[in-house]
Amino acid sequence: MAVKRESITFTSLSSEIKNGDFKNIYVLQGEEPYYIDRLQQLIIDTALTEDQRDFNLSLYYGNTANVREVISACQQYPAFSERKVVVVREAQLIPKQPGHKNDLDIFASYAEKPLPTTILVICHKGGVLKSKPFTDALKANNNGLVFSSKKVSEGRELETLIVSYANSLGCNIDSKATRMLADHIGTDISRQFSELDKLAILSEDKNITPLLIERNVGISKDFNIFELEDALARQDAAKAFRIVDYFERNPKNNPSMPVIAMLYTFFSNVLITSTAREKSPDAIMALVGVSSPWRARKFIDAARMYNTRSLINIIGCLRECDTRSKGIGSRQDQYALLKELVYKILHA
């Protein structure tokens, strides 16, 4: 009976909407705007044809919206269509009305008895919608749904999301390709999904590979943070310095500070691996919080090349380099610092 389904995901809700399984009221809220924007547009695209939108789509924006006018639109029957869609964008900006602590409270009366032919979508970005009367009314209504859009964290959660979205497009993506996208693009979900949409179209065999990413996303297969990690993990000095030289020649796509941060994370996980009692891929995955056996084996291999004392020294070098790269105690060029760091890691 409860309207707020904590387990609902962007993918599962998208599937429901695509299948025409609509609720009468959607509250799309939270810190990740991408999901909110995509879901409200998906509702519009699925519920109404282009021809039907002229008469049956009403759009309101929070900074100029009048809640009573929105409710009035919701109570109108559709014209030449099975349903009408009313969307309130940027609802967090709706101005307060006299006599109401929160004018979203005014939606409570409509939520108690929504018009069955209307789909009301309220988009509340940046946090949770705070209106107890409205949410209480939603909880008493089987046709209401609250979706909370949370920011994705780096690491395992982001990699899992990339794999899940690629699979939803009918594609497979290998571990290295997943890591390339995660580290190069980060938690910019809009760009992540946009790139995956493009890669899915370009992949003839529905496999998203490092080579496909290199050709179409602008990440070099041979000169990137993963290859630098591999070179340092194998103590391959020649390749490590070639990669840093490439970074220096292409500074726009390879700033040193993210490289230092990624190496810090990598060697921190290698240190954890080196002190672990059980060093199977499954055990290391659980210990350091990664979803990729390939990634876990990389930590295990690196732990064989560096002893615990060396790894502690490397962590210290990385912290020092991070401080100096921010201009504290050093005026060296960022890539000179990076080359010095690589030398210290290899000789730790």
Image: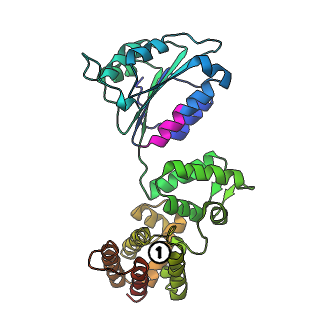
User: In front: 65, or 7?
Assistant: 65
User: In front: 107, or 63?
Assistant: 63
At 62% from the left and 28% from the top, the residue drawn is 46
Q: Quadrant of the N terminus?
A: top left
On whether residue 38 falls in the magenta region, the answer is yes
Q: Quadrant of the C terminus?
A: bottom left
Q: In this view of the protein, can residue 195 be seen by the observer?
A: yes
From the top left corner, tell me how far across and down residue 310 is, in percent: 36, 84
Q: Is residue 127 left or right of residue 254?
A: left
Q: Which residue is mark 1?
A: 300
Residue numbers of the magenta segment: 32-40
Q: Is residue 128 left or right of residue 46?
A: left
What type is the residue that disc 1 sits on? Ile
Q: Is residue 266 left or right of residue 327?
A: right
From the top left corner, tell me how far across and down residue 179 is, in percent: 53, 63
From the top left corner, tell me how far across and down residue 64 is, in percent: 40, 25
